[in-house]
Amino acid sequence: MTALRLEALSLVESLPEEKILTLINFLRDLEDRAEKDKRLAMKKDAFDELETLRREIPNLDYDKELATYRAERFGNANFG
């Protein structure tokens, strides 16, 4: 066991019983925050990867695109 762990155990052993619950809650909170930070970092990495795939789309004529899609999808149905 490392000297740091031995020191931590010594400090815990010297705490009164009522303070140990506070310490346990603090350690659990610390662990939860670390897990949240890890999940957030994963989400940020995924977003950054998506950002690298993003590219500019030339100016589109949305009405023309819609008309083309409708013609492909529905044929000559009347949408006028």
Image: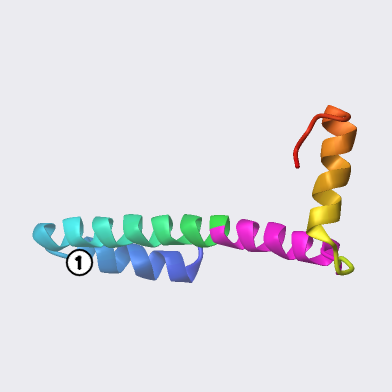
Quickly name the residue at label 1: 14
Nearest the camera: 30 or 63? 63
Instruction: Please give the count of numbered marks on the rendered protein.
Output: 1
Residue 72 placement (x, y as % from top left): 90, 34
Q: Quadrant of the C terminus?
A: top right
Q: Residue at x 40, y 55 (%)?
A: 32
27 vs 72, left or right, is left
Nearest the camera: 35 or 25? 35
| Kind of element beneath mark 1 | helix
Q: Which residues are magenta?
A: 40-56
User: Within the image, what quadrant is residue 8 found in?
Assistant: bottom left
Q: Amino acid at mark 1?
A: Ser
Residue 35 placement (x, y as % from top left): 49, 55
Nearest the camera: 59 or 24? 59
User: Within the image, what quadrant is residue 60 found in?
Assistant: bottom right
Q: Residue at x 85, y 41 (%)?
A: 69
Q: Residue at x 70, y 57 (%)?
A: 46
Q: Residues within 10 Å of mark 1 (few under 14, many from 20)?
A: few
Q: Residue at x 82, y 64 (%)?
A: 54
Against 42, residue 71 (above or below) is: above
Is 38 part of what is drawn in magenta? no
22 vs 46, left or right, is left
Nearest the camera: 41 or 51? 51
